[in-house]
Amino acid sequence: MSTSNGTTSVPTATFTDAGFVAPAESDILTGALADLNSAMGGNLNTDISTPQGQIATSFTAALGDAYAQILAVLNGVDPSRASGRLQDAIGNIYFLSRKGATSTVVTVVCAGVPSVVIPEGTLIQDSAGYRYSADGAITIDETGKGTGTFTCTTSGAIACAANSVSTYQTISGLTSVSNPSAGVEGSDEEGRVAFEKRRSASVAMNSVNVLDAIASNVGEVDGVTSVYAVDNPTSAAATVGGVSIDAYGLFVCVNGGTDEDVALAILEKKPPGCPYVGTTSVTVTDPNRKYTTPPSYVVKFTRATATATYFNVTIRSGVDVPSTATASIQAAVLAAFDDDDNATIGGILYSSAYYTAVAAVGSWVTIIEITIGTAASPTGFVADFDIDQIPTLDASDITVTVS
């Protein structure tokens, strides 16, 4: 109860071991009305439709908003809850900035005259007119083919369907290009969850000679969307995640980024004496300024192979199932795939993770079964990818069956 000494019936916020606790707005309103009633000598009509009720309501809204802002600021200093500018500020402590939109990366087979080298930066295009730049030089072998990755010159979530690319820039000896699998779709500006995962992983980036440091450093390379790093600590070759790794070898698989930038990022964190394992070789000069004649190293790593993912969605038939059912379900699965954190190099995808997205398409959806795999007409519920593969998904590989 309010008195002349300045006390109030409005409850106060508190700091506890659990953090900042604000009173409920209903309690704030009750206290404000009690204060007004006391100030007016009692027997005041405290209905909120009255002028005094409106004053108390406005006071409650203003105080409640102030408490919400305090809570937002306090949550903003917690890395697991921060967002927006406050999350950017936490990132600055680690010398990290939020990544802008990433670009779609597509694996391309170049056909032409043997021994012809397709230079890094060579442009091709897809059926929608988007252009893609070669991440590194590609040499056409004796079979008349050479495989490499191309990155879209336009950032964002741009779909590149299978068999949709063609030549754009004329290169002597290059006759055609094709992409047997869909591209690994890019993304919009890095979101809150993705930024926090990268910040957490970056803690290891300040070290050297550890796999987390190598993976984090490569992950910071402009254009890189996924990376996998592993070593073989034994004295004999070993198969890890479907890939043979030489004795004591270091294997790094990456999607996106130029060859030179990726190789330098690996060199900066790799332990000395550990041999590289990979299908891409790049000569890197040590950038340390203390050298008068800096040494050069041949760094090896592997470009992730885009591997098609197949879905079979079976729903129950009914009079309310629309003619657009297939297209709607395909769009939902594609969207869920883009948000699936497991859709990365060496990932494991689960069909159960897609039930919610499909069910949300409409009330007419009754799911009988969703299967997934790396071959057409999948019958399983789990899709495993080797550590040199990255899953891709094309709408044409999503089969919808109404039965």
Image (tube, rainbow, N blue to C red):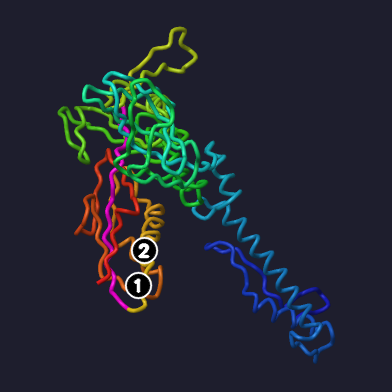
In which quadrant of the rendered view does residue 20 lie?
Answer: bottom right
Q: Are marks 2 and 1 in contact (CB under 8 Å)?
A: yes
Left or right of residue 400, residue 334 in this image? right
Q: Quadrant of the C terminus?
A: bottom left
Magenta part, dominant SS: strand
Residue 108 image position (x, y, % from top left): 33, 35
Residue 286 image position (x, y, % from top left): 42, 17
Depicted 210 relative to depicted 23: above or below:
above
Residue 9 image position (x, y, % from top left): 72, 78
Depicted 2 relative to depicted 210: above or below:
below
Q: Residue flagged by tag 2: what amino acid is it? A: Ile
> Which residue is the extreme one toward the top?
292
Residue 329, labelled with which disc? 2
Name the residue at 38% across, 51% down.
Answer: 341
In which quadrant of the rendered view does residue 150 lie?
Answer: top left
Residue assigned mark 1: 365
